[in-house]
Image: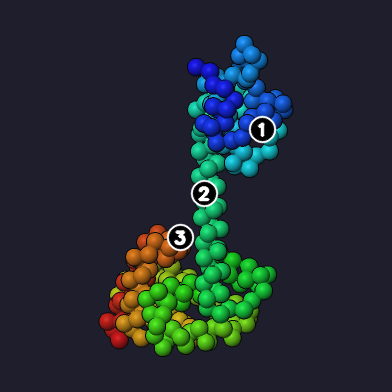
């Protein structure tokens, strides 16, 4: 079956002008012509266009796309596999960017006043305001949370660097205890859990043990928090949860 340039434009959601341009640069030339001289595209041509548009969406310039689709060693399956991996990689990058935007929104909501350079330097891939911002959805109307906004609005770059260093040290202690086989309800893990509670209380808002339990539940209920801890050590999120609950029981 042959397709007219208008039909191909509708199928691929591109303009006729785009198809004419691809023809002019030799990227996609129709396989045939009608008796009146109009362009006619075959099914093979339409599939080539799909490949071109996919690579274009991925950001490849037209000259590179020509080399990719004309690669004699790559058949349709090879192109699909390559495009699939590229799309997955792009999806991962977009998710990472989305998380960064979320953290920036959280920082703004927390009243954090840092320059863009300072935000990159301090936060990197992990924002210490994340816990407090998440707590807003559950306890945003409480006096404790309102106090956290007041306190964090005055923090300097050095304050945030100190907070990050303390948070990293506590997480490193959790990882070490977990890998050493220390029981989650043992003294070592519970003491680290108490440091964790004190850290949030010192820098954000007062965290009584019941509120700390709620944070612990969030660490295994919310995939974002679970991933954060499990990236440090597989299974760590559950361990931190159990240690916090044990420490609350001890109190």
As helix, strand or loop, the secondary structure at mark 1 comes to: helix
The quadrant of the picture occupied by the C terminus is bottom left
Residue at 29% of width from left, 77% of height from top? 246
Viewer can see residue 228 = yes
As helix, strand or loop, the secondary structure at mark 3 comes to: helix
**In the image: residue 188, left or right of residue 95:** left
Contact? badges 1 and 3 (CB < 8 Å): no
Counting other residues with Cα less than 10 Å from the Cα at mark 3, is it few (<14), some (14-19), or many (20 or more)? few
Q: Which mark is residue 231?
A: 3
Q: Which mark is residue 210?
A: none
Q: How is the image coloured?
A: rainbow
Measured Cα–Cα span from mark 2 to mark 3: 19 Å
Q: Which mark is residue 17?
A: 1
**In the image: residue 158, left or right of residue 147:** right
Counting other residues with Cα less than 10 Å from the Cα at mark 2, is it few (<14), some (14-19), or many (20 or more)? few
Which tag is nearer the camera, tag 1 or tag 2?
1
């Amino acid at each position: 079956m042959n397709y007219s340039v208008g039909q191909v434009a509708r199928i691929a959601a591109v303009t006729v002008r785009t198809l004419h341009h691809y023809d002019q640069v030799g990227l996609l030339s129709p396989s045939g012509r009608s008796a009146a001289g109009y362009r006619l595209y075959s099914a093979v041509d339409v599939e080539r266009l799909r490949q071109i548009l996919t690579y274009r969406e991925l950001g490849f310039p037209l000259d590179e796309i020509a080399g990719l689709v004309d690669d004699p060693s790559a058949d349709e399956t090879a192109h699909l596999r390559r495009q699939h991996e590229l799309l997955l990689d792009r999806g991962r990058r977009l998710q990472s960017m989305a998380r960064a935007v979320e953290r920036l929104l959280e920082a703004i909501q927390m009243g954090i006043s840092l320059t863009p350079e300072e935000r990159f330097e301090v936060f990197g891939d992990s924002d210490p305001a994340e816990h407090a911002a998440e707590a807003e959805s559950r306890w945003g109307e409480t006096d404790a949370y309102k106090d956290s906004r007041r306190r964090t609005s005055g923090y300097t770059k050095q304050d945030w660097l100190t907070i990050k260093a303390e948070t990293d040290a506590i997480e490193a202690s959790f990882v070490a205890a977990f890998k050493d086989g220390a029981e989650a309800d043992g003294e070592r893990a519970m003491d680290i859990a108490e440091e964790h509670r004190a850290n949030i209380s010192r820098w954000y808002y007062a965290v009584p043990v019941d509120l700390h339990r709620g944070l612990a539940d969030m660490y295994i209920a919310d995939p974002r928090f679970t991933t954060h801890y499990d990236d440090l050590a597989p299974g760590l999120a559950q361990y931190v949860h159990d240690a916090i609950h044990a420490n609350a029981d001890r109190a």
